[in-house]
Image (cartoon, rainbow, N blue to C red):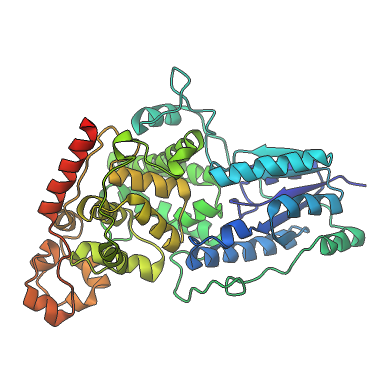
């Protein structure tokens, strides 16, 4: 009788270029997948309906891919510490394989499940799949984790990258007895997001699943990647990959992505095009820098990295925060971005920096509040990237230049000079001259007639207050 391996999917919802799944496939002719709907995540107050909708779509395709491979993806619902060992025992599994994660909750969950499986005599194997280089692979000369991106990048880019792994191809189906054991262990039909109580009726920025992710990667690397460096900061232009959700849920493998970028460099027609590809590669490295940081400094999930911001005297005005959330600050570029987030579950990265700077430096609101709001609304939310981005914008994180204050008007002038992005998301302002849209210097009478709010704060005054408080914190 063939030894069965149970492969536990988490942030790797694909059968191609999946290290753990490919390794299981090499070691056994009988591999079964499992995904556990974890109430610790799904019942969190910070879960987003759009994110669950994307995830369930990925699972739907993954389940179909397993069937086509002659195996199956089992769906469980409940505490993983109970459900995964129970299923492994029911199937008399030789081992449980899974790919590791950097997040504090996932690491603690893995520790408890590892012990539970070992107590039952079931072997485990774990792998680093969502990173090109594991946290242990990248360290300074003093064998310490990096806290500044530039030296991290130099080390990271110097190391050879692993080739994509083979597609999962099962060779032996389950017996009737094993199938019955699965049913007895509590397997359920795959629910929809709405079945779970999450309703998202708007279109997703990227269709869920492995197929759509591969198509988007190919589309991006056939054209937009060659002008990425020039166009990535302009929110009205489709100049970015929009693969963030696919990478967060593992609908596409990072080695596959890297392999395609290397092909793009080889096919570049100019130095400028090659530099654009390298610029996107640097963004992939930023993603890993933030994941390594979360792994080595898990306290980042709860607090600022820089001492000056651990007890910073924020105002935390609830009315100002609500206005920011609703896109009613009176600053067009900020409000347009917040409307985009609410409507699509996504926001252009340049705009993420603008609204984060505005919340923390103009409204003097704790970045943790903004970070949580993004968690509740982004379909591509990733703890490491979201936390890293917010700490960067708030000047509280790992950054050699701690104080950056974005002026909304100058940001709009530089990155939305025709007002195209603002007009799309604030249609009531479409008729205004571009100069007014960009500067935000809209007369009060016009604001009232257009149904657009007054400015809730004045940028110049607020940046002075922020600097005074920051300087005082440094002294103390």
Residue sticking out furthest to the top: 142
Residue sticking out furthest to the bottom: 449
Q: Residue at x 68, y 57 (%)?
A: 35
Q: Residue at x 39, y 62 (%)?
A: 346
Q: Quadrant of residue 155?
A: top left
Foreground residue among 284 and 475:
475
**Residue 420 image offset from top left, x and y in percent:** 21, 67
Q: Is residue 467 left or right of residue 298?
A: left
**Residue 273 image offset from top left, x and y in percent:** 31, 44
Q: Residue at x 72, y 40 (%)?
A: 114
Quadrant including the C terminus: top left
Foreground residue among 89 and 430:
89
Q: Is residue 223 left or right of residue 400?
A: right
Image label count: 0
Residue 205 visible in rendering: yes
Foreground residue among 348 and 462:
462
Vertically, is 12 above or below 291?
Answer: below
Foreground residue among 280 and 405:
405
Q: Quadrant of residue 68?
A: bottom right
Vertically, is 292 above or below 340?
Answer: above
**Residue 150 image offset from top left, x and y in percent:** 34, 31
**Residue 337 image offset from top left, x and y in percent:** 29, 63
Q: Is residue 352 left or right of residue 127?
A: left
Residue 240 visible in rendering: no
């Amino acid at each position: 009788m063939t030894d069965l391996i149970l492969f536990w999917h988490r942030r790797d919802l694909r059968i191609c270029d999946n290290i753990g799944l490919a390794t299981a496939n090499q070691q056994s002719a009988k591999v079964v997948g499992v995904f556990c709907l974890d109430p610790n995540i799904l019942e969190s107050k910070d879960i987003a309906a759009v994110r669950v909708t994307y995830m369930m779509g990925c699972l739907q395709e993954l389940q179909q891919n397993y069937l086509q491979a002659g195996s199956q993806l089992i769906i469980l619902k409940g505490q993983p510490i109970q459900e995964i060992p129970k299923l492994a025992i029911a199937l008399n599994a030789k081992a449980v394989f899974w790919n590791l994660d950097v997040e504090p909750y996932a690491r603690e969950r893995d520790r408890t499940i590892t012990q539970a499986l070992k107590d039952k005599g079931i072997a485990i194997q774990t792998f680093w799949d969502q990173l090109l280089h594991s946290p242990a692979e990248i360290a300074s000369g003093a064998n310490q984790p990096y806290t500044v991106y530039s030296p991290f990048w130099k080390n990271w880019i110097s190391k050879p990258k692993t080739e994509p792994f083979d597609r999962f191809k099962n060779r032996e189906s389950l017996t009737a007895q094993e199938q019955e054991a699965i049913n007895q262990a509590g397997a359920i039909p795959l629910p929809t997001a709405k079945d779970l109580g999450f309703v998202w009726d708007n279109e997703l920025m990227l269709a869920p699943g492995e197929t759509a992710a591969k198509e988007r990667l190919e589309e991006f690397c056939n054209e937009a990647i060659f002008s990425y460096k020039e166009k990535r900061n302009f929110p009205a232009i489709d100049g970015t990959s929009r693969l963030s959700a696919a990478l967060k849920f593992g609908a596409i493998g990072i080695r596959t992505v890297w392999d395609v970028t290397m092909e793009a460099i080889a096919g570049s027609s100019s130095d400028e095009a090659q530099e654009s590809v390298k610029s996107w590669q640097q963004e992939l490295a930023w993603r890993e820098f933030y994941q390594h940081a979360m792994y080595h400094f898990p306290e980042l999930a709860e607090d600022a990295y820089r001492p000056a911001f651990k007890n910073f005297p924020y105002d935390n005005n609830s009315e100002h925060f609500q206005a920011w959330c609703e896109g009613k600050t009176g600053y067009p570029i900020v409000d347009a971005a917040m409307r985009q987030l609410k409507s699509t579950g996504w926001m252009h990265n340049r705009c993420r920096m603008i609204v984060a700077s505005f919340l923390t430096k103009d409204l003097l609101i704790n970045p943790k509040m903004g970070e949580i709001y993004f968690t509740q609304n982004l379909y591509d939310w990733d703890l490491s990237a979201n936390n890293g981005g917010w700490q960067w914008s708030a000047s509280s994180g790992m950054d050699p230049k701690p104080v950056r204050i974005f002026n909304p008007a100058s940001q709009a002038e530089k990155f939305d000079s025709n007002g195209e992005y603002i007009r799309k998301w604030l249609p009531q302002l479409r008729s205004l001259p571009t100069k007014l849209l960009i500067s935000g210097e809209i007369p009060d009478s016009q604001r009232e007639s257009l149904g657009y709010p007054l400015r809730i704060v004045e940028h110049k005054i607020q940046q002075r207050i922020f600097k005074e408080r920051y300087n005082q914190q440094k002294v103390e």
